[in-house]
Image: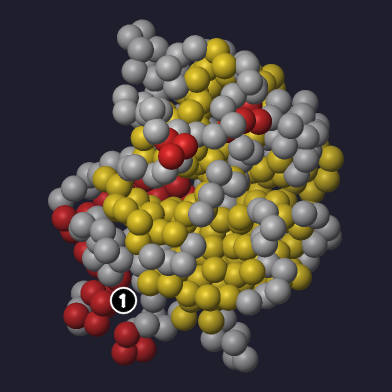
Amino acid sequence: MMRRASRIGELLSGVAFVTLALALGSTRSADGHTDPGGETKARCRGETPTIGTTFFEVRRVDLQDLDTAKLVTPSVIDISPSGNHILIGDRDDYDVKLFDRGGRLLSVIATRGEQPGQVFILDGAAFRNDSVIVIADAGRMQLMEFDLEGGLITETNLPARPITSVQVWGQSVLVGGRSPPTLTDPRVRGVHVLDSLGNISRSLGSQPLASVGGVPRYLAATAPFFHVTHGGRDSIAVAWRLTNNVEVFDLVSGGSRTFPIGGGPGYVDPDTLLHRLGPEGQSDVLNRSSPIVGLFTAANYIIVAYFSPATGSNDLRYLVYDRSGALVEFVNDPPLVLGAHADSLLAIGRPSSPGENRRYAVRIFAPCVTGPENEGA
């Protein structure tokens, strides 16, 4: 069971942001037809696959050429700002594959290796713009930039080991990775904003290394998950693998707020559990609590993904909150979301069509419209 939980954690840790569903233009819609213009507003439809009652599937893009573009464990998805390219990062095959908007393979970028321009441990990938891809290598501690043909543009040494994702904010790159505490600051920082030279300009999100009774919190539990929201007020939401709250930072003003996590069936709060366990049992807290395995923001929602091994369930679960921190709904066994941007969530999965077991599809979910606009939908 824990192997499954670990796999889900690995898949979700590669959290990267993507463009709006409408940016894909002419792709297959949820009912299987080609829709060149897209919908200006998403409406919930009764027979369409959904994520709870909050998001419904509005687009699918079947990835082609998979005899060549083998996917083992897709863990990173991003779409270029123009919508013309899709990248898929493979955590177990250690590379990044580039597809066009119709799902056709264009190139393979940064294959496995320890030489410049190669990836030893793929942590994250994202489009810097329409022609440049940023890749973080947690093994060689490098932040690399490639063109769309896979040519290496530049390689920069990372000051903090990335362990969950890489995202782009303006001219800066954000990486998720714990930094060690210092004598002046005993907290573990989790999200680092890097300038063009790869230097840390800001660090956001914090997690005390010490927990109950001075017993150290295991480093495996200090994995930060984060997601950047772009819009009128750019912000970043941060949570840690063992945590009971989400921190939300305004990237412009520097202000922050915190709201508690909880309310879903099977959710066992790690901090509460630590208080109940003696020192000999605290090392088993990952097996007995509900560790967070992903965090996403889309539209007016913050989505926390978790897994509850102690309940005996193999299901991934989501808690959906609004921006104030109020719980909107609990979702059991949802599609595997790997990224989000603005009003869209991006998932990956296998189509159910017979004979297509080896194919993957990128699935795009948009928020449901409520009220009069949804009538008759």
Q: For the point 37% across and 16% down, which residue is it?
A: 357
Q: How many residues crowd mark 1 within 10 Å: few (<14), some (14–19), many (20+)?
A: some
Q: Is residue 287 visible?
A: no
Task: Tell me residue 208's x, y (percent).
Answer: 46, 81
Task: Tell me residue 253's x, y (percent).
Answer: 70, 74
Q: For the point 78% across and 40% down, which residue is it?
A: 129
Q: Nearer the viewer, residue 274 or 94?
A: 274
Q: For the point 61% across and 55% down, which residue is it?
A: 229
Judging by the rendered image, the residue that carries numbered circle 1 is 271
Q: Nearer the viewer, residue 369 or 11?
A: 369
Q: For the point 63% across and 26% down, which residue is it?
A: 24
Position of the C terminus, as image quadrant, is: top left
Task: Note whether 357 is above or below 20 in the view shown.
Answer: above
Q: Nearer the viewer, residue 161 or 113?
A: 161
Task: Note whether 350 is above or below 252 in the view shown.
Answer: above
Which residue in the rendered view is the most extreme toward the left? Answer: 312
Task: Give left or right: position of 308 versus 300.
Answer: left
Hey, which quadrant is residue 7 in on the image? Answer: top left
Task: Tell me residue 211's x, y (percent).
Answer: 37, 82
Task: Tell me residue 75's x, y (percent).
Answer: 50, 40
Task: Give left or right: position of 104 versus 263.
Answer: right
Which residue in the rendered view is the most extreme toward the front? Answer: 372
Label 1 SS: helix
Task: Note whether 299 is above or below 322 in the view shown.
Answer: above
Task: Note whether 320 is above or below 76 in the view shown.
Answer: below
Q: Is residue 377 visible?
A: yes
Which colour scheme appears in the figure?
secondary structure
| Three-letter amino acid code of the residue under disc 1 | Asp
Which residue in the rendered view is the most extreme toward the top? Answer: 355
Q: Nearer the viewer, residue 178 or 191?
A: 191
